[in-house]
Image (cartoon, rainbow, N blue to C red):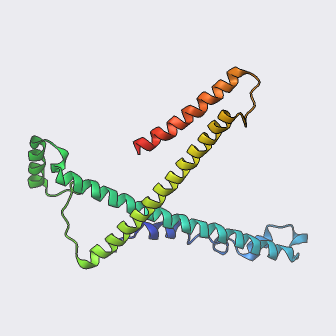
Amino acid sequence: MAPTEHSILSTFLLNPASLQTFMTLEQFTALFPRTQRGNPQIKFLYRELQYQRALVIDQVKKEITAETKRGQKLQREVARARRKAEQDNFGLDPDDGREIDMEIELFGQTSNLPTNKSHTLQSILPEMATAHADLEAEIAAMEAEAESTLTDMKTIVGDLSDLRYGKFSRTSSAGEGLSQDVLEGLKGLREVCDGLERN
């Protein structure tokens, strides 16, 4: 079985990462001056370093898991793009399609071209579960973005309301500065609204 991205990253980043792997307590103690090697604080310091190292290893594990999920998502996006290209006749004109057909006949199917792979019940269930997780993640990201946009809009509208009722949060010594602040606030509101239209 071919190694997975997760197993490769774990093998090279986690296995040799613990403090005991590359430095024992005796080796650590030998780094101190001879007069201090009997100090009990050295053992405490070594244990503290082990703890700190374990925290770093836990963080690396989380990042490996996140990176693996990003890789799987990228693979699904590539597969989706390949299926779409296959449905669009590879997105090429008929002459290009004939050239591809000739290449397939001469050299066989290459990995660069989309392949039609049927699913079984055992293979479709994990795919559906990951697609469900991806959709939930996309929905959560969109909700967070909408909440952020709404907060930005409320802030800008609040600033403009302060201007209308004469409660200036930013005091300006000259009328020119005040009008500039108003224009900047309106530009900010326009940018937020334009961003909403594009999405």
Seen from the viewer's position, the closer of residues 126 and 165 is 165
The residue sitting at the right extreme is 35
Q: Position of residue 195 (x, y in %)?
A: 46, 41
The residue sitting at the front extreme is 165
Residue at x-position 55% and y-position 69%: 61
| Quadrant into which the N terminus falls | bottom left
Report how many numbered discs are placed on residues in the image. 0
Quadrant in which residue 52 is drawn: bottom right
The answer to whether residue 112 is seen in the rendering is: no
- Please indicate whether residue 192 sits to the left or right of residue 49 in the image: left
The answer to whether residue 73 is seen in the rendering is: yes
Q: Is residue 162 above or below residue 15?
A: above
Residue at x-position 71% and y-position 33%: 166
Q: Is residue 36 above or below residue 151?
A: below
Q: Position of residue 80 (x, y in %)?
A: 28, 57
Seen from the viewer's position, the closer of residues 56 and 140 is 140
Seen from the viewer's position, the closer of residues 50 and 70 is 70
Q: Position of residue 132 (x, y in %)?
A: 37, 68
Q: Position of residue 42 (x, y in %)?
A: 83, 73
- Please indicate whether residue 110 sits to the left or right of residue 164 in the image: left
